[in-house]
Amino acid sequence: MTSREHDDAVGEAPTAAEQLDVKRIELQQATAGLEAAELAYDIPKTVELQNRMAVLTKFIARLEAAAAVEAAAAAQVEAGELHANLRAQYAEALAALAPHLEASAKAIRAAMKAARACTTTWAAASRLWYEVHVLEMGFNLGVADIAILPIAPVGALIETFGEEVEQAARQSHRQPLPVYSSSASDSPEQVALNKMVAAHQAVSTLGADLKLSSELLALFAKAGAPAPRVPRVTAVIGTSPSVQAVYPGTLESALRGTNSPAIPETEKAKADRAEIRRRNTQGQAQVLREFGEEAARIDREDDLIRRGKLKGPLDQGLRG
């Protein structure tokens, strides 16, 4: 059975965007369930839902990246055509670079030849200017009205050439590619998404200044920026059950030794009591998770000891 026949028989596999919607709903359900378990002081259920939310969060991160890559696939054909066109233009520019450079070198050599002739002529005029005025000084002659000797040609040439070189230097900086974040734990889709986001940000903010081609700007504008990630909902895990619930009337009963009339709770008091109960549950759940992790670590050490890969427990002073 071909893949097309298989898809017709069982249906096409869900897209990353469809899977992402499902996992986001599951995360919302798990978040609501976690809050209920915390309020009910159900520690095993709290641990289970915390673990489930952690797994769902990782799934969602990967699916967000995959969905963004899928969304960009619609413009890949047009982007591929523009990519080929830009590569051809780049090859043409490189091919024209060498002749232009050679023409510039010839022009510079011709300019230097003319500059040397100009300098020789100026040097002769400078010598004659000196002789005219030194003769006037030496024999008390009147000062002749002769034209002012201009600055040396080399100064004028340096100034003119410097302006041209400065203008060319401003156009001779190669723009670095956008920087994107990447880590060893990122999936290929996440790396691709990071690159896409960085490229879209660079083109949208620097496109005009860099004078990028209108075709490239139009394609990026048409494709639109990749969808940003939705805020992730994570469980807040307390470090210790240090906050104890105090109910209205408890302190007064302890001081007087008798049960005082019930004091109606305000909405704020109810919310505070619920938050304290949740924190107590979170703290107990964290302790239970830590005990489970420690037991698993000890089991791994014992297995290594049995196989002869470890001489003894790594924490002999702590066991027992």
Image (spheres, rainbow, N blue to C red):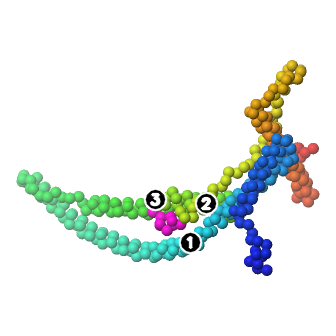
SS at badge 1: helix
The residue nearer to you, when weighing 56 against 1, is 1
Q: Name the spot of residue 17 as percent of width and height, x first.
A: 69, 62
Left or right: 125, with 73 as reference point? left
Asked if residue 126 is positioned above or below residue 312 in the image, the reply reads below
Which residue lies at the image location 28% right of the left edge and 59% below the top edge? Answer: 155
Left or right: 282, with 144 as reference point? right
The tag on residue 209 is: 3
Which residue lies at the image location 30% right of the left edge and 69% below the top edge? Answer: 112
SS at badge 2: loop
* Mark found first going from the N terminus, 3 or 2: 3
The tag on residue 78 is: 1
Left or right: 141, with 104 as reference point? left
Residue interval drawn in magenta? 211-219
Q: Nearer the viewer, mark 3 or mark 1?
A: 1
Residue with the mark numbered 2? 226
* Mark found first going from the N terminus, 3 or 1: 1
Amino acid of disc 3: Asp
Amino acid of disc 1: Glu
